[in-house]
Amino acid sequence: MPALASKRKCCLTAAAARATKYGAHAKRSRWHVGPGAAEPAEAPDISEKRSAVHQFGIVGGEYDSKEERLQQILDRLPADAGTTLILAGPASAATVGATIDRCRRKAVAAAAREKAGRSKAVASMCQGVELSEEFLEQWTCGRCTMINGGLADGCYACETRRGAFPRITVVTVDPQSASRAAPWNAASCQLVINYDLPRSVSDYIRRLSALHPLEAKAPAPPERVAYTFVEESELKSRALREVAALLRSTRQYVDAAKAAEFDSALQLVEDNGAGEEEEGWDDGDADEDSEACDCAHCRGSILGSMSYHPLLPVPGIQVSANSGVEVVRLPLRALEDFDKAVPFIAPRLRGHVCTLICLHCLNVHTPWDGWEQYFAPPECTGTVRVVLVLADGVSWHEYPDSALVGAGGSAWIDILDMDSMDRSDMLLERLVDHEAALLNGQSERIVLMGMSQGGGQSMLRFLRSNLRLGGWVGSVCHVPTAPHTPRNRDPLIVGGRPTVNRNQPVRLLAGESDCVFPPGLVLRDAARLRNVGGFTNVEVELRPGLAHEGPLEAPQPPKPDSSAATGARARSPARGAPTATGASTVSAAPVLSRGASKSFREAEAEAALQRSKAINRAEKRVPELLFVQRFLPSMVDFGPTSGTEAC
């Protein structure tokens, strides 16, 4: 797969570099109990904790401070998250309390403004003034999924307040205390935040005991989560090594999907704790290359470019003369002054049947170069227009939690920067409107697609779109919703949000061995998309053996004997039998000689063999494109378009 020549690792190559170390069946790591020692057996008190979601957050030093990280989390916790228990030492308790009060005041002020707006709307309604759709729009309770009226301050069923601040409890934990009793009461707690790193593995296990099942009001209780702050100076501490050893030992007793969650946590603390010398490059190189991309599209400083690719031959399917895949490459910055770029990307082939707008992954502009033919499904006989948007700086948005960019993953929360996402989304909206105009307003022939970081960005446009789109297809990504986005900017609950695409198909390919966005995270987001967002046509395929960087390498079967392969090719249909195109070998005029007929059948068999090999290569390199092929026919009618504009 093409990658940047710079030393900065992309989300694919960085994950590939870790794949050998953290395979789907890896049992050992750099931090082991002792030289040559086997992994310890799981203790009975650990067994019941293996269902929890573990995530670390690196803070301090060159990263966000503890206060900043805690505020980011509190701003994103949904009101239905259950009780959150924050465990802090005596020296940190006052800071934690002040941060919570600040976040609560901000949330209460925002809720008060919303309530004042609704009260004003009620008064206007009493005076006969027509209300805007923003106030009449129904909203879904995140706790019980009850549909409530737009003017309601709380849920009719469970009385959850609209825009409520989550329930937070702070417990001061004295590390010098000799008492083993838990300093908290047993309660329904879904999230434990270790503001200070536990002093030992036994202390970490004791804190996990605070996690309890959620009340029965929620239709799909969320996972129990333990989020631990780790100072940069603590990455090589004994306490962290002990906790990592606990996670590794517990990992042996879970399935592949859960193991990916453990790996995401282990990779973060171990890869960052290894030191920069292991990477072989310094901060100077990172600063020099951070904004550079040496792909051909960036070197040429293009406003837009086009290329054409024939459809893959399919036996029995006749294609039109103008068939093919029309690929547009468009830098995101070109959308700022779009009129200058429009002449360079105008359709050259008349009547394209649909448009795919595709967003690449982090740090790679060219994940699909050389595979453009695979955007079109076998059923397509016309022209498919594919718009590959190229992000500025090879990233669609910024990352507040920068430690997660180069190592590890997000088992529970992926802190998204909504300001930078909004800037990209505004430009993408301009592109969608333009492509809809090229289709004479048939916006339902537009499908959004994205991979990894690009998948989340394209999903945001799908959720916010006022145009009815054909659907959305994503790979190894997740939904941009809480707890990843701030509560007041969650596209699933924001007031006046578009609902035109609620019934449109959403298809997501998730890897069972994906350590960047583990399956649990993806499935929880998909459930929220259904339960809170009201989307009715959401399907997630959890594929075994698929990691974030692609399919894991499997043992290769032995090559067949050459004589057997020759015999298999010789077993072609008998003369007079229907061929792949439906024609008879003896009905054609003139009748082929025996030698010519044999040559024709062998050529046809060879073509089928070559196609099969090509599909197998694509399955290993670009499985997301074959995933698009499978679902695109159900999203778009491949019948003829009515007067599509062309240049």
Image: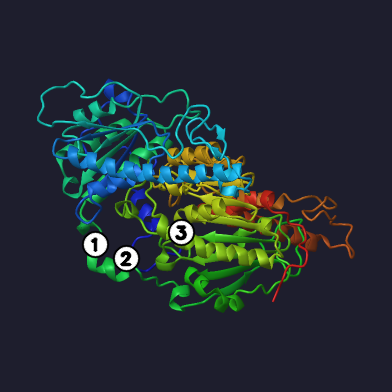
Residue 539 appears at what percent x and percent y? 58, 41
Reading the image, the residue beneath label 2 is 7
> In whole angstroms, how far apart are the C-alphas of marks 1 and 3?
35 Å
How busy is the neighbourhood of tag 2: few (under 14 within 10 Å), some, or many (20 plus)?
some
Q: Residue at x 23, y 42 (%)?
A: 98
Residue 489 appears at what percent x and percent y? 45, 49
Task: Please tell me which of labels 2 and 3 falls first in the chain.
Answer: 2
Reading the image, the residue beneath label 1 is 280
- SS class of the residue under badge 3? helix
Q: Is residue 327 above or below residue 487?
A: below
The extreme front residue here reads 127
State if disc 3 and disc 1 touch (CB < 8 Å). Answer: no
Q: Is residue 113 visible?
A: yes
Q: Who is closer to the viewer here, 368 or 524?
A: 524
Residue 112, quarter of the rendered image:
top left
> In whole angstroms, how far apart are the C-alphas of marks 2 and 3?
29 Å
- SS class of the residue under badge 2? loop
> In whole angstroms, how far apart are the C-alphas of marks 2 and 1?
9 Å
Residue 592, quarter of the rendered image:
bottom right
Reading the image, the residue beneath label 3 is 422
State if disc 1 and disc 2 touch (CB < 8 Å). Answer: yes
The amino acid on which the numbered mark 3 sits, given as a three-letter code, is: Asp
